[in-house]
Image (tube, rainbow, N blue to C red):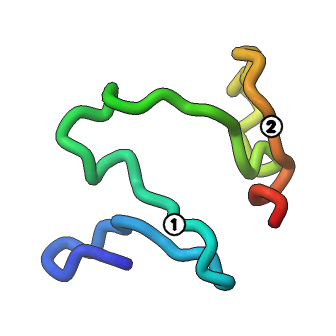
């Protein structure tokens, strides 16, 4: 789903309807939530180091 005014992605639905992804930019306080896992780490830039101990998935979260 995209903002009708500016085109920014707001959220997305998983095809089977079990999960919704909400963009962090839609919240007034982006510090209100802490990450619990990392998805699509196979697509991250080489210089980004994810060493916080959270679960990492090469792609999306397994169904």
* Residue at screen point 76% across, 56% down: 61
Task: Say above or below: 46 vs 63.
Answer: above
- Secondary structure under tag 1 reads strand
Q: Residues within 10 Å of mark 1 (few under 14, many from 20)?
A: few
The quadrant where residue 60 appears: bottom right
Which residue is nearer to you in this view: 24 or 42?
A: 24
Q: Residues within 10 Å of mark 2 (few under 14, many from 20)?
A: some
Residue located farthest toward the left when viewing the structure as drawn:
5
- Secondary structure under tag 2 reads strand
Where is residue 54? Give x, y as percent: 74, 25
Mark on residue 20? Answer: 1
Where is residue 38? Give x, y as percent: 69, 39
Where is residue 1? Give x, y as percent: 38, 78
Instruction: Give the mark toward the camera: 2 or 1.
Output: 1
Task: Say above or below: 63 vs 50.
Answer: below
Is 48 left or right of 21, judged from the image as shown? right
Residue located farthest toward the top when viewing the structure as drawn:
52
* Residue at screen point 23% across, 74% down: 3
Residue located farthest toward the front when viewing the structure as drawn:
18
List the residue tagged with mark 2. 56
The quadrant where residue 48 appears: top right
Is 38 left or right of 56, judged from the image as shown? left
């Amino acid at each position: 789903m995209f903002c009708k005014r500016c085109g920014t992605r707001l959220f997305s639905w998983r095809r089977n309807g079990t999960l919704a992804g909400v963009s962090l930019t839609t919240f007034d306080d982006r510090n209100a939530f802490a990450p619990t896992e990392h998805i699509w780490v196979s697509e991250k830039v080489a210089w980004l180091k994810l060493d916080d101990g959270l679960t990492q998935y090469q792609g999306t979260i397994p169904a």
